[in-house]
Image (cartoon, helix red, strand yellow):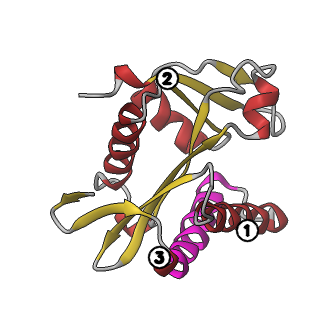
Amino acid sequence: MTQNNQLTITRLTQADLQSAFELFTSSITNTFEKEGILHLQDNLHSEIEMKQQKALASLAEHSDIYFLAAKINETVVGTISFAPCGEVIRALSDNQLDDVGELGSLYVLPSYQDQGVGSALIKELITYLASQGMEQFCLDSGYRSAQSRWKRKFGEPYKVAIDYWGPGSAHMVWLCQVSDFVK
């Protein structure tokens, strides 16, 4: 567990689910709005449902999903997960990253963005990966706003699928070495 001012980062629990679900709805809707794709309501609802299912699945006894929640006063203000690579990464990497786990579900409530919550979650997760002997992780994004952040934090992507989501809309995959980010 890490505490940073009022911020506490722990594994997601059953008691955190409602707050996490509200976070997914708020932050994913905000992202769709910023990306100019809020009109894609089916995609929006599908994305929210997928994240809710991943959070629920992480609570199963022998789950291969490790899910963290950043909380302030018991309210989930951010999440991050580590799980086997998803279908998009598998497809875009021609299955070369199938054995590398994926950093995902990094969401921060809009009112807490740009305050270090996401960075604290990434640091906590990478520290966990190092403690488990993991050497690599990957991540992906089709959101332009996230892609620019990931380029600053993780460097150039491993793979870029041009026009993946339509003309001018790329999807990017990063492959990272855990040792590059452990301090």
Q: Is residue 72 visible?
A: yes
The residue labelled by disc 2 is 176
Residue 79 as seen in the image, left or right of residue 70: right
Across and down, in percent, residue 73 comes to 28, 79
Main SS of residues in magenta = helix
Residue depicted at 63% across the width and 44% down the height? 143
Q: Earlier in the sequence, mark 2 or mark 1?
A: 1
What residue span does the magenta drawing correspond to? 17-36
Quick one: quadrant of the C terminus?
top left
Between the residue at mark 1 and the residue at mark 3, the CA separation in whole angstroms equals 16 Å
Q: Earlier in the sequence, mark 2 or mark 3?
A: 3
Quadrant in the picture for residue 10: bottom left
For label 3, the SS is helix
Q: Earlier in the sequence, mark 1 or mark 3?
A: 3
The residue labelled by disc 3 is 16
Instruction: For marks 2 and 3, give the one nearer the viewer.
Output: 3
Between the residue at mark 2 and the residue at mark 3, the CA separation in whole angstroms equals 29 Å
Q: Three-letter amino acid code at disc 2? A: Cys
Across and down, in percent, residue 15 comes to 47, 81
Residue depicted at 31% across the width and 49% down the height? 120
Taking the view exactly as shown, the residue that stands out farthest to the left is: 5
Instruction: For marks 1 and 3, give the one nearer the viewer.
Output: 3
